[in-house]
Image (cartoon, grey):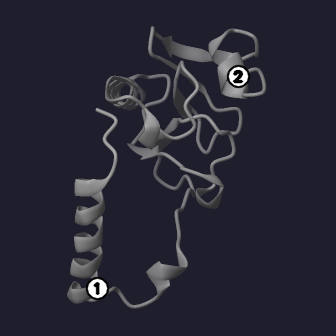
Amino acid sequence: MSDCIFCRIVAGEAPSSVVFRDERVTAFLDIRPVTPGHLLVVPNDHVGFMQDLPDATADRVGAVARRLARALRSTEAIRADGINFFAAEGEAAGQEVGHAHLHVIPRFAGDGFKVGAVAWRQPAPTREQLDASAERIRAAVSTGPDTG
């Protein structure tokens, strides 16, 4: 898609700092990093949401993200204390580019990166509420589409 910045990066038509590329995925540094070494792993084919990726591509995104996380934690270049894997699906979740992607965010003691939610300041749900949600999700999984 010519209007998708990630498609243009994958095609080599937009500047990027690529750290990994193969036939299924490309990984590059985020231009607005949360911390030094913040990476994006994207499928080379345009797909809007991670949930819609073919299984083989989703598996490759995950495998490359894990490989990069190991590199970020073990290299002298970054030497992260920890890693966050983060995917945002849809505008309401904060997805800014409509191309599936997984953030690999190196974490460091005192880096200031926080994830917060209003719900975390409220009482935790009861076991009954959790069980009811689990039942609805199980039902959706058993009847929903499978990208297999």
Res. 110 mark: none
Helix, strand, or loop for circle 2?
Answer: loop
Number of marks in the rendered image = 2
Count residues near mark 2 (Cα–Cα under 10 Å), then give few for <14, some for 14-19, many for 20+.
few
Where residue 57 sits, quadrant-wise, is top left
Counting from the top left corner in percent of width and height, residue 23 is at 45, 8
Report, in whole angstroms, how far the alpha carbon at label 2 lies from the one at label 1.
Answer: 42 Å
Where residue 127 sits, quadrant-wise, is bottom left
Q: For this rendering, which residue is in front, 21 or 35?
A: 21
The quadrant of the picture occupied by the C terminus is: top left
The quadrant of the picture occupied by the N terminus is: top right
Q: Nearer the viewer, mark 2 or mark 1?
A: 2
Where residue 54 sits, quadrant-wise, is top left
- Residue at 61% x, 45% y is 34
Q: In this picture, is 118 found above or below 47?
A: below
Counting from the top left corner in percent of width and height, residue 75 is at 40, 22
- Residue at 76% x, 20% y is 2
Q: For this rendering, which residue is in front, 58 or 73?
A: 58
Q: Amino acid at mark 1?
A: Gln
Counting from the top left corner in percent of width and height, residue 143 is at 27, 55
Whether residue 112 sits left or right of residue 5 in the image: it is: left
Whether residue 29 sits left or right of residue 1 in the image: it is: left
Q: Are marks 2 and 1 in contact (CB under 8 Å)?
A: no
Q: Amino acid at mark 2?
A: Met
Count residues near mark 1 (Cα–Cα under 10 Å), then give few for <14, some for 14-19, many for 20+.
few
Tell which circle, 2 or 1, labels the residue nearer the N-terminal end.
2
Helix, strand, or loop for circle 1?
Answer: helix
The residue wearing badge 1 is: 129
The residue wearing badge 2 is: 1
